[in-house]
Image (spheres, rainbow, N blue to C red):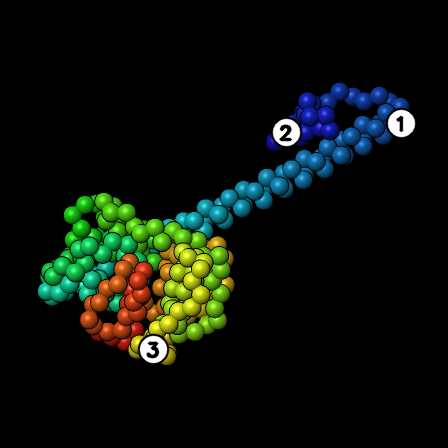
Amino acid sequence: MPIYWSNPRTFYKPHQEVSRPSSSPASQDAVYRTLTENVLIWRVTERKMLLAVIGLVLLSSSTYAADHSCALTQHVPAFHAPQQSRLKTLLRFGRQNRISFGIETSSVLAEQTEVNTPPGTVASVVKAISGMKSPTKLECFEGVVLLRDQATLPPAWLNVIVPEFRIPRTMLGLANAALWMRVETALDPQKQGFAGDIPGDDLTEQVGPYNVKQASARALLCRLAASSRGTIWIVGEVNEGSGTSWRNRLWTLIPYGKDHF
């Protein structure tokens, strides 16, 4: 490793011979001071480089762990669902494997079909359940598997930035309602009040607290789902007709809860 002198145009390497200094004490002191200063510079530089290397190793390790914790790569046993809607089948699969989903395209999930898949990855089973004709985009985001048809653009409101989402620990239904109000006011700051009810909330399932700033509606929905016992959120108002669900004009949240499909 080079040792850089105070003059950046000159350097020497460890164990490299240097010319013999003058025999006068003053000259020897000057050379000694110069060597000492530059050895210290070398040691500090070496330590900084070592810390940088350690940081890169830790960063790459955390990135690796994050990538490999994605549910899409998990292996699951053979899966069977009787003739029913694709959404209800996805709910069954998600509950069995404790995987939360965010669905940005809902065009084909009402279709009735029977699903049988061999053992494989979560990604392969979800693609079979979705039945989308065009390529299906699957990705992990904030602990949730996102699903959409690549031929269809997701709604623009998913990308709206919510300035602040701060609530205490509370029931999932109340947290979902609070998030909906934050997203609506981010879309239209003129909105002042909201009215409605939260049917069938499970008092035992609580999420939060949250204190998040400058996050997209998509990211906040995923955080909500990831901190629950298991949930599917889907764009639009969807009435599956089974179990608890909370609907607004933007999305529907279906918790796995204690219901069985």
Q: Nearer the viewer, residue 141 or 63?
A: 141
Q: Is residue 11 left or right of residue 119?
A: right
For badge 1, the amino acid type reads Pro
- What percent of the width, then of the height, locates residue 231? 31, 66
Query: Mark 2 highlights which residue?
Result: 2
Q: Which residue is mark 1?
A: 25
Rendered residue at 42%/68% (across/down): 193
Q: Residues within 10 Å of mark 2 (few under 14, many from 20)?
A: few
Residue 260 sits above or below residue 128 on the image: below
Q: Is residue 197 above or below residue 94?
A: below
Residue 255 x %, y %: 30, 69
The amino acid pointed to by label 2 is Pro
Horizontal side of 76 relative to 160 (left or right) equals left
**222 sits to left or right of 114:** right
Q: Which mark is in front, 2 or 3?
A: 3
Mark 3 highlights which residue? Answer: 202
Disc 2 or 3, which lies upstream in sequence?
A: 2
Quick one: label 3, few (<14), some, or many (20+) residues within 10 Å? some
- Which residue is more in the foreground, 165 or 113? 165
Quarter of the image that includes the N terminus: top right
